[in-house]
Each structure stands twice: as C-alpha cells, then as structure tokens.
Amino acid sequence: MNNFQRNLRVTTASDWALRVAFASTDLHLVNQHFGSTPRLAIYGVKPDRVTLLQVTDFIVQPGHDLDKLSCRIAALDGCLSLYCVAVGESVFRQLLRVGVRAVSVPATTSIAHLLTEIQQNWDAPTVQRHQEKRDPRRFERFQRESRWEEDER
C-alpha cells in the first residue's frame, strides 16, 4: 500500500551530496515523531547554500503499520540524518541499516537553526564520510590513490 498523499521533489535533487530530513508539519520547526509525522521535509546542504529538495506528505494512519514505516523510510533515500522529536528503537535500527542517522531534538527546534549548525560543522568526519559514499567516482579515485593489486592465482 502506498502511504504517500503527496510527494513534491526538486528535479535537481541528485546534485546534492548531503541530504537531511526533518519531521515537521510546518516546514519551520521539528515537531513530530517519525512514525506518526504527516510530513517530511528534505533539504540539500552545502557549505554555502541550503535548498528545500523534497516535501512528502503522508496519509496519517494510527498504529504501527509496517507499510506506513517502510514508506517513510523509503522517502529518506540518500539522507544522512533525520531530525525528529522521537523515534522508536526498532525503527532507529532500521534507519541505521539504510544509512540514516536519526537525531531526536526537543519539540519546536528550528529547522533553520539545525541547517546552520550542519553548515558550521561541514568538516565533521560524519559529513565527510557520507559525501565520500555518495561520490560515484570514489572507487576510481581509490584505485589511483592507492596501489591496488589483484592477486591472480
């Protein structure tokens, strides 16, 4: 079952190496639990620029429906982090398996403030590792930089 009510996406979203999601009803504040949020906002972040890339509205359903969670997790494709008010432990582990780090913040935390913090910590190891993973030429660069040798037996 598709739990998307609406999914608006910028066509150049793939140009952004760092994508960050927020569980928010108003696109200004983090104010939702991940499992019950009616909306996710995904921003592209660069050291000198931030752009709203995607807004996904979900059909709100009570309970712990697996389709509901898998739809939300799928919407986070390519994101480094998800900021939300809360996330269950099992969903937290599912997010880690797909490479998304869930961060719980107090309700009414400003999205603009969090985006500024991310830019200020641009050189942090977590951000750098994520950017390297998203680089499609990382293996070519690795081969040139190191002396990779295949053992032909």
Image: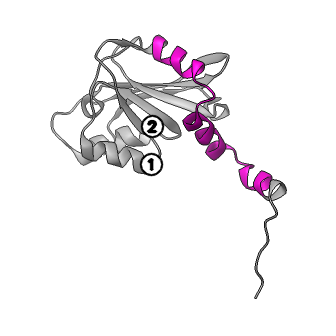
Kindly indicate the quadrant of the structure image that contains residue 124.
top right
Q: Which residue is labeled 2 in the image? A: 76
Report x, y in % for residue 77: 49, 41
Q: Main secondary structure of the magenta part?
A: helix
Residue 137 image offset from top left, x and y in percent: 75, 49
Q: Which sits in the foreground, 49 or 74? A: 49
SS at mark 1 in the image: loop
What quarter of the picture does the C terminus occupy?
bottom right
Rendered residue at 41%/51% (across/down): 97
Q: Amino acid at mark 1?
A: Val
Above/below status of 73 relative to 117: below
**Image spot of residue 4 (x, y percent):** 36, 34
Near mark 2 (Cα within 10 A), the count class, few <14, some 14-19 or many ≥20, is: many
Sequence-wise, the earlier of marks 2 and 1 is: 2
The extreme left residue here reads: 63
Residue at the (28%, 22%) spot, across then down: 32
What residue is drawn where x is 38% and y is 41%?
73
**Pointer 2 and pointer 1: residues touching (CB < 8 Å)?**
yes
- The answer to which image quadrant residue 62 occupies is top left
Locate residue 84 relative to residue 126 in the image: left or right: left
- Of labels 2 and 1, the one closer to you: 1
Task: Describe residue 64's horizontal placement relative to residue 6 as left or right.
Answer: left
| Region in magenta | 113-142
- Cα separation, mark 2 vs mark 1, equals 9 Å
**Residue identified by numbered label 1:** 98
The kind of residue on which mark 2 rests is Leu
Magenta-colored stretch includes residue 23:
no
Label 2 element class: loop
